[in-house]
Image (cartoon, rainbow, N blue to C red):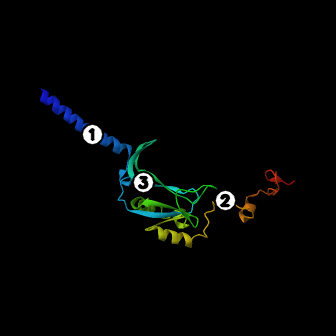
Amino acid sequence: MAKNDKDDAQNQQQSGGQEQGVQQAIATPGAKYLEHSGDKIWVACKLPNGFVLRAHEMKKTVEATLGGHREIESARQVGAPFKINGSAQAIGFSTPHRIVHGYGLTQVPRDLWEAWLKVNRDSGIIKNAMANGFNNEQSAVAWAAENAGRHSGLEPMVEGDKRAKKLLAPGVVAIEQRPGAGAAQRVN
């Protein structure tokens, strides 16, 4: 009987370890992007705050309807989200990432970038050259230099910016440039 108790304890210990591994896999769905190949690429991003890469896969699910149910495909996130650095920098502070020619640079797992790009190839982020992926940092810097003149439309406005006039409501004049001036004034 002691031998059986010992065997039961060993089996319980082994199955507990397996169960813990299953629990961990459930807690981190789509672990294939967490354990990527290690191959990385450089992404250059013009958006000030960057964006988050999320890979998804389509899964068949059942949706409740008034007449019963129907089978649909829905997107499920695979792996952890990955933050792409942007070009914004707080005044007086340095960024933990490199910014060149108005583009923030980030190293990204190749398989995650390719999965995201496959689905988002027609996105404005890609079509308008707000972000792109490269095999090495030198290529990313060269591309950023070529596209340095592009504007995302999210840049801060500076004095004399022609966009500022479009934003003022009819009858409102710009803020005066003297000390103690308040907000924009309405002209009657």
Secondary structure state at the residue bearing disc 3: strand
What residue do we see at 62% from left, 66% from top? 151
Identify which amino acid the numbered label 3 is placed on. Answer: His
Counting from the top left corner in percent of width and height, residue 136 is at: 44, 68
Counting from the top left corner in percent of width and height, residue 78 is at: 40, 52
Q: Residues within 10 Å of mark 2 (few under 14, many from 20)?
A: few
Q: CA distance from mark 2 to mark 3?
A: 33 Å
Is 74 left or right of 153, judged from the image as shown? Answer: left
Work out whether mark 2 precedes mark 1 in sequence or the reverse, and give the earlier one: 1
Identify which amino acid the numbered label 2 is placed on. Answer: Pro
Q: Specify the quadrant of the image occupied by residue 20.
A: top left
What residue do we see at 53% from left, 67% from top? 127
Counting from the top left corner in percent of width and height, residue 176 is at: 82, 56
Examine the rendering and report whether any part of residue 54 can be seen. yes
Identify which amino acid the numbered label 1 is placed on. Answer: Gly
What residue do we see at 45% from left, 62% from top? 117
Q: Are marks 2 and 1 in contact (CB under 8 Å)?
A: no
Is 10 left or right of 105, judged from the image as shown? Answer: left
Examine the rendering and report whether any part of residue 74 can be seen. no
The disc label shown at residue 41, or none: none
Q: CA distance from mark 3 to mark 1?
A: 29 Å
Q: Which residue is mark 2?
A: 156
Work out whether mark 2 precedes mark 3 in sequence or the reverse, and give the earlier one: 3
Q: Which residue is mark 1?
A: 17
What residue do we see at 60% from left, 55% from top? 93
Work out whether mark 3 precedes mark 1 in sequence or the reverse, and give the earlier one: 1
Counting from the top left corner in percent of width and height, residue 4 is at: 14, 30
Q: Which residue is mark 3?
A: 56
Q: CA distance from mark 2 to mark 1?
A: 54 Å
